[in-house]
Image (spheres, rainbow, N blue to C red):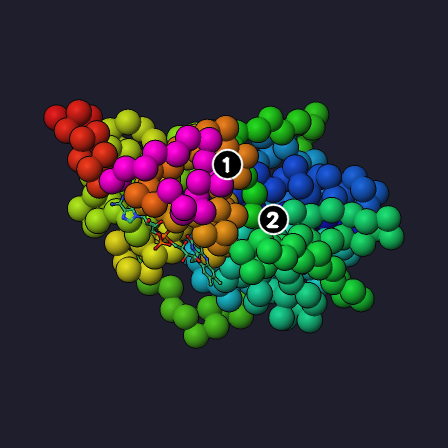
Amino acid sequence: MTVLVYIDYVPATRQPRQESLAIIDVARDIAQKLGVDVEGVVVNSVVVATKLRDMKILPKIYNIRLKNVPEGTYTPTLFGEALVEFCKRRNVEVFLFPATQRCREIAPYVAAKLDTGLVADVSELYVDEKKEVIAVKPSFGENILAHIYIPDRKPKMFTVRASLRKRTITTYDTCELIHEEVTVQEHYGIEYVKSGQVYDPDIEILPERHDIVIGVGAGLSKDSIELVKAIAKKLGIGVGATKKITDRGILSSKFLIGESGKIIRPRVYIALGISGAPQHMTGVKDYELLIAVNIDERAPIVNYSTHFYKSDANELVRKIAELVLR
Ligand SMILES: Cc1cc2nc3c(=O)[nH]c(=O)nc-3n(C[C@H](O)[C@H](O)[C@H](O)COP(=O)(O)OP(=O)(O)OC[C@H]3O[C@@H](n4cnc5c(N)ncnc54)[C@H](O)[C@@H]3O)c2cc1C
C-alpha cells in the first residue's frame, strides 16, 4: 500500500511546480500515520523525474513513459489515462495532487475512471483514530469547516492547496527512479500540434512567490491597479486581488486570493480598497503584518488588520508611484 503524490511540472522549463513540492510533506506525514510507503509519480518526463530523484525528497519516483507521445505533450485525458493505468497496477491507498490548474483537470478524470472519490481543494489533511484520512475544506467563507472522508473506495483522492513559503523538506539517503511504460489510446480525439513556451509577463509578481503582497480591491481604480503592478515589479513584491477585480477582468484569476483562488502566506499583506469579506480573507494566512487602507473605518478588514489607515487608497498609490517609478 502506498500514498502516491502526483508531481505536476512546468512543461517549458521541465521544473516540478512548487505546489507539487509543497505537498510532499503532507504526503509523508499521512503515509507515516497510516504505516505505508510514500512514492511520487511523474507523467512522461525523464528530465523532471531525474531532477526529483536527485532532490531525494521521496524514496521512490515513477516516471510513466507514454508510448509514441513526445515529452512535453499534454492533454488532461492523456495524462489522466496514464495515471488510471498506473493506479490499476498497484495498491494505492491515497493519491494526492497539488491543487494546480492542470491537476484540477486531471484528478477528476482519474477519480471518475477509477470509480473512486475525490475531495478537491482541501486546505488540510489528517488521519483520525480510526486511520481514516480526513480532508478539511472551508465552505461558505470559512464559516463552516467541512471534515470529509471517502468511505469504501481506493485510492482516496485529494487535490491539496499548500503553502508555497519556503520550507525545509528532509531528504532520504537515496531515491529510486523507476520508468514504467504505459500505452494509452491515442489522444482521445485531441490532436497534438506542437508545444512551445508561453511567456507570462506577470510571473514575477504572482502573489504566492512573495513575502510581501499588495492586495487590490474594488476601492482601487483600474489605473491605480496598473500602477500597483508596476510598483510591485519595481520593488520585487507580489500582487493579489479580490474576486471583484478578477471578475471584472482587470486582473486575471492568477491573482485571485481566497476561497475561489489561491491561499497565500505572506509575512506582510497590504490591503488597498478591500472590504475584508471572509471569502477573500480565508486566502491570506499566517501574516505578521496586515496593513489596510480603506475609506470606511467600519469595513470588516479592520478586524484583520494590524494597522488600519482611513485614507483614499488611489491617492496613496499615486504618491507611491511618483516616488518608486520615477
Ligand atoms: C461562493 C463565493 C466565493 C467567493 N470567493 C472569493 C474569493 O476567492 N476571493 C475574493 O476576494 N472574494 C470572493 N468572493 C466575493 C466576496 O464575497 C467579496 O464580494 C469580495 O471579496 C469583495 O471584494 P472587494 O473587497 O474588492 O470589494 P468590496 O466588498 O466592494 O469592497 C471595496 C472596499 O473598498 C473601499 N473603498 C472604496 N473606495 C475606496 C478608496 N478610494 N480608498 C480606499 N478604500 C476604498 C470600500 O470602503 C470597501 O470596503 C466570493 C463570494 C462567494 C459568494
Which residue is painted at 25% across and 47% down in the image? 220
Q: x, y (%) of residue 16?
A: 50, 41
Name the kind of residue labelled 2 in the image: Ser
First of labels 1, 2 by sequence position = 2
Q: Is residue 305 magenta?
A: yes
**Disc number placed over residue 123 in the picture, else none:** 2
Q: Quadrant of the C terminus?
A: top left
Give the side of residue 81 with respect to residue 33, left or right: left
Q: Which residues are magenta?
A: 297-313
The three-letter code of the residue at mark 1 reads: Arg
Report if residue 193 is visible in the image: yes
Looking at the image, the residue that sits furthest to the right is 130
Secondary element under disc 2, as helix, strand or loop, is loop
**Residue at 33% across / 42% down in the picture?**
294
Q: Quadrant of residue 14?
A: top left
Residue 17: where, in percent of width, then height?
48, 42
The correct choice, above or below, for 240 with respect to 318 in the image is below
